[in-house]
Image (tube, rainbow, N blue to C red):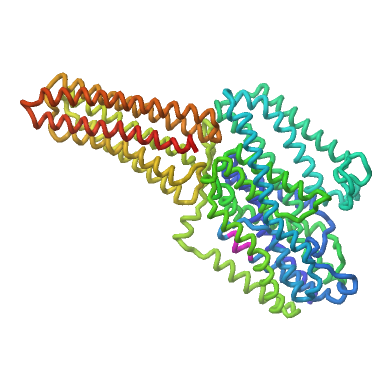
């Protein structure tokens, strides 16, 4: 029977590890995928490698048997309740794993740590209510507010610094060459400290060097004093890492030839920083959170073999391998679902924004890991808060608070749902291995069937669409075009429609057959409509923009109106020949050329709008965009003057051919509609500049 218990425990622990990989790995890779720094495939490979290395090489070989100290037993109670706790840990593992499966199905990033803690609390309340450490539970509940809030603040400040120091500069790329090495110093200093305090703490236990880092009862901030919370050796190592990274980046950037210009080159540098930060987060996550699967399993194994539970249990290498392999498989199979939410549904992410979010999250985790706090926070909660903070740097409208509210609700639900399920499973197990087998297989099978059954309407909507503002010369392989890039594609299609319209006007003015140019105008307008539909489809998948979605849809509608009116001009030309007056025709052509010039300047404005978005809506770029909008308005005014001249001549000289003159006037009106639509489309960008 004991062998059966161990085997079942291993299977449930493997299922839990799979869920950790599927849900929690978004902490490391979601922003990298959302920004386009890594494709989904590459992110999965990188995450799998670093998660596995962290779990197997640096996961602790000694683990606390009761996760995060939420239950307290004395020695006599441990001996008395050991058998029940063995089944209780299995129930807690199964409950947490099933909750994670459901959350991952819906793309909700929840805390695997808090899920297993909820399961442990639930079974603890049922087995021995007095054992629940409510002080520790309160710390966890408070962390739901504290860690996302601090992560958001640090990410907001980090991106604000990047924006002010680099994006607002007259030559952002050259500024990046100088400032990136300086930014690398604090970044890698923090990562160096985090590596020691968070990722390698299990390694120090393994090699018997627990005094490298301070004990939890440190008493002073003075690094030179005994009992320092942050000892001098840790500071020296971290500073050495920061200086080395800064020097390497300086040497690279000094001679690096960028293929991209402007903000494209800036984001290229932040791609490097973001990927390095993401690799650290994945590595630290594997080293720490593998214990969420193997910690309870180590307790089960210990009770099954020794008959009694102790405060800390040894973790054999094969169990670390099991946890690492389970996490890796989870990343590769279902990891994309939560990456999709983190990377694109909360807010718009670029490499610079993604770096700021990951740096803010890593710093927050480090702060709460310090001995003077030692509060058990969730990396998931922290990173989500950091992503929201980066989004708020672009204005509140850039964050989808409906998505964030759902995520926050799933956080609150984690503890009670896992706790209730844990109690239910413990009762059904009835301290019988055969019951454990039947209940586990039935419950896991039912959950997997429910969450994986085919629903064409849902599955089609769940295809991960990774959208980035990556301003690279070449698109990132496997990544979708950004919404602003496709919006510019639509502007180009609109401009092409107007160019064909101008060709048709030229043909009509010259007394030639404009049919071919009219057909080309209609086809170009249809192409513009297709791109417009593509943009609406992209927005329909839940992709976040760096601007208010309603404002953007208004911009799209205004832009599309230009092509509609241009098609109408061309079709007017097919009704009958133009008024037979050379001056009237010459004035009509002058107006058409003025309209075409207005549209060309508008397309330049849209192209710069894309650049404005890449800059993080930097004030300097906003001023330049306002200048372009004014130029569009001036050109539209020139088109109005051309219309007045043409209309005056047509009405003064067209008495002999009133029908032809009226037809000419209608063409002039439709041309004026094109210019007016252009002006309104450009002015629709003003909320972005002024907001």
User: Magenta stretch?
Assistant: 99-104
Residue at the right extreme, as displayed: 226
Height in image: 110 above or below 567?
below
Relative to the observer, which residue lies in front, 119 or 685? 685
Q: Would you say 498 lies left or right of 30 here?
A: left
Farthest residue, direction left: 656
Percent x, y of residue 352: 61, 37
198 relative to 584 in the view: left or right? right
Q: Give percent across and percent down for residue 491.
A: 38, 34
Q: Residue at x 54, y 38 (%)?
A: 476
Residue 315 percent coordinates (x, y): 82, 59
Name the residue rendered at 74%, 77% in the picture: 433
Q: Is residue 331 above or below residue 87?
A: above
In depth, the one of 673 and 460 nearer the eye is: 673
| Outermost residue to the front | 690
In the rendered image, the vertical position of residue 633 relative to residue 305, given as above or below = above
Picture residue at 43% right of the left edge, 42% below the top? 552
Visible in this render: residue 307?
no
Q: Quadrant of residue 577?
A: top left
Q: Seen in the image, is 495 located left or right of residue 107?
A: left
Q: Quarter of the image for the N terminus: give it.
A: bottom right
Residue that appears at 31% across and 33% down: 676
């Amino acid at each position: 029977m004991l062998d059966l218990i161990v085997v079942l425990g291993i299977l449930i622990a493997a299922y839990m590890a799979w869920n950790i990989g599927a849900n929690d790995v978004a902490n490391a890779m979601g922003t990298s995928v959302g920004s386009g720094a890594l494709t989904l495939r590459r992110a999965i490979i990188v995450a799998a490698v670093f998660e596995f290395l962290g779990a197997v090489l640096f996961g602790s070989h000694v683990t606390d048997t009761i996760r995060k100290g939420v239950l307290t037993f004395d020695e006599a109670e441990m001996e008395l309740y050991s058998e029940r706790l063995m089944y209780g840990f299995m129930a807690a593992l199964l409950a947490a794993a099933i909750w994670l499966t459901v959350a991952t199905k819906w793309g909700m990033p929840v805390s695997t740590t808090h899920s297993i803690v909820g399961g442990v609390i639930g079974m603890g309340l049922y087995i021995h209510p007095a054992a629940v450490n409510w002080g520790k539970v309160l710390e966890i509940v408070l962390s739901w507010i504290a860690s996302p809030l601090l992560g958001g603040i640090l990410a907001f400040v980090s991106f604000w610094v990047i924006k002010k120091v680099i994006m607002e500069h007259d030559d952002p790329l050259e500024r990046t060459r100088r400032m990136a090495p300086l930014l690398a110093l604090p970044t890698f200093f923090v990562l160096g400290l985090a590596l020691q305090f968070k990722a390698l703490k299990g390694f120090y236990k393994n090699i018997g060097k627990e005094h490298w880092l301070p004990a939890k009862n440190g008493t002073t901030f003075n690094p030179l004093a005994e009992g320092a919370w942050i000892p001098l050796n840790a500071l020296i190592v971290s500073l050495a890492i920061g200086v080395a990274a800064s020097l390497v980046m300086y040497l690279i950037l000094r001679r690096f030839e960028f293929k991209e210009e402007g903000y494209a080159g800036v984001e290229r540098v932040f791609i490097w920083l973001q990927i390095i930060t993401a690799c650290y987060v994945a590595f630290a996550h594997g080293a720490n959170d593998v214990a969420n699967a193997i910690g309870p399993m180590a307790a089960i194994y210990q009770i099954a073999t020794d008959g009694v539970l102790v405060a800390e249990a040894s973790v054999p290498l094969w169990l670390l391998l099991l946890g690492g392999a389970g996490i890796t498989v989870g990343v590769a199979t279902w990891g994309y679902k939560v990456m999709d939410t983190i990377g694109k549904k909360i807010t718009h992410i670029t490499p610079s924004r993604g770096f700021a979010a990951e740096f803010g999250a890593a710093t927050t985790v480090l702060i709460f890991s310090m001995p003077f706090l030692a509060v058990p926070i969730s990396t998931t909660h922290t990173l989500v808060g950091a992503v929201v903070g980066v989004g708020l740097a672009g204005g509140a409208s850039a964050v989808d608070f409906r998505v964030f509210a759902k995520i926050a609700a799933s956080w609150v639900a984690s503890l009670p749902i896992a706790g209730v399920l844990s109690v239910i499973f413990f009762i059904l197990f009835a301290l019988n291995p055969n019951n454990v087998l039947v209940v586990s297989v039935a419950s896991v099978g039912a959950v997997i069937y429910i969450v994986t059954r085919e629903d064409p309407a849902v599955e089609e909507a769940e295809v991960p669409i990774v959208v980035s503002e990556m301003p690279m010369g070449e698109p990132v392989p496997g990544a979708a075009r950004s919404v602003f890039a496709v919006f510019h594609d639509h502007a180009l299609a609109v401009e092409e429609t107007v160019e064909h319209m101008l060709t048709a006007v030229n043909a009509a003015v010259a007394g030639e057959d404009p049919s071919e140019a009219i057909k080309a105008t209609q086809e170009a307008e249809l192409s513009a409509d297709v791109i417009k539909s593509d943009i609406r489809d992209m927005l329909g998948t839940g992709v976040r923009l760096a601007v208010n979605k309603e404002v953007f849809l208004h911009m799209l509608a205004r832009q599309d109106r230009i092509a509609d009116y241009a098609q109408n001009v061309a079709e007017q030309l097919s009704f009958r020949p133009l008024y037979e007056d050379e001056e009237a025709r010459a004035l009509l052509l002058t107006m058409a050329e003025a309209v075409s010039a207005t549209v060309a300047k508008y397309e330049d404005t849209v192209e710069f709008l894309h650049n404005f978005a890449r800059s993080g809506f930097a004030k300097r770029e906003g001023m330049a965009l306002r200048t372009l909008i004014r130029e569009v308005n001036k050109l539209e005014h020139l088109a109005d003057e051309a219309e007045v001249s043409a209309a005056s001549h047509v009405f003064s000289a067209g008495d002999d051919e009133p029908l032809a003159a009226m037809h000419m006037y209608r063409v002039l009106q439709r041309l004026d509609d094109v210019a007016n639509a252009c002006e309104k489309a450009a002015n629709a960008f003003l909320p972005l500049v002024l907001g």
